[in-house]
Each structure stands twice: as C-alpha cells, then as structure tokens.
Amino acid sequence: MVSAIWAVDFAGLEVVGIAEPSALIHNPNALNCLPRGFLIVDDEYEAVPEGEDKLFFQLVGRCR
C-alpha cells in the first residue's frame, strides 16, 4: 500500500527557488507509514475512513 501522497501545485513558470503550495496526505493503513514531518510541506493530512467508501482528510500539521 502507498504510505502517503505528496501534492505540489507548480505554477509552471518557474520551479527553482519558488516555494509552491504543497500538501502530504498520510495513509494510516500503510504497512510502512511515512513519519509526520518527514517532508517539508504547507499542510499535512491523514486519511480517515468515513463510511464504507469515503475518506475524510484530517489536518494533522502545518510545517510552513
């Protein structure tokens, strides 16, 4: 299973030297979970099951 999903919103004009918005979503069911704070991101979330077929992304930290 995937440990986490890292999302970055690149503007497309310049990538180097510009801090773009980023988020990390942890999978609590992963066999090898990624530690919180491992990547420097704006927002860090944990996927929490809600019902049988939905997930709720709970904010667990802000790094920047």
Image: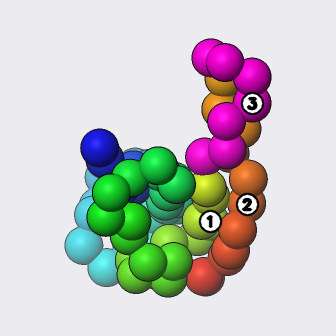
Instruction: Give the CA distance from mark 1 to mark 2.
Output: 7 Å
Find out whether residue 50 is within the magenta segment.
yes
Which residue is denoted by mark 1 in the rendering?
Answer: 43
Which residue is denoted by mark 3 in the rendering?
Answer: 50
Q: Using the image, determine if residue 37 lies above or below residue 30.
A: below
Instruction: Give the CA distance from mark 2 to mark 3.
Output: 15 Å
Residue 35 x, y percent position in the rendering: 44, 78
Q: Amino acid at mark 1?
A: Asp
Q: Which is in the foreground here, disc 1 or disc 2?
A: 2
Element on which disc 3 rests: loop
Disc 1 and disc 2 in contact, CB within 8 angstroms: yes
The N terminus appears in which quarter of the rendering? top left
Q: Which is in the foreground here, disc 2 or disc 3?
A: 3
Residue 28 x, y percent position in the rendering: 52, 54
Which residue is denoted by mark 2 in the rendering?
Answer: 59
Instruction: Give the CA distance from mark 1 to mark 3.
Output: 21 Å
Find out whether residue 17 is within the magenta segment.
no
Q: Using the image, determine if residue 50 lies above or below residue 31.
A: above
**Residue at (67% x, 36% y) in the render:** 49
Q: What is the span of residues highlighted in magenta in the rendered image?
A: 47-53
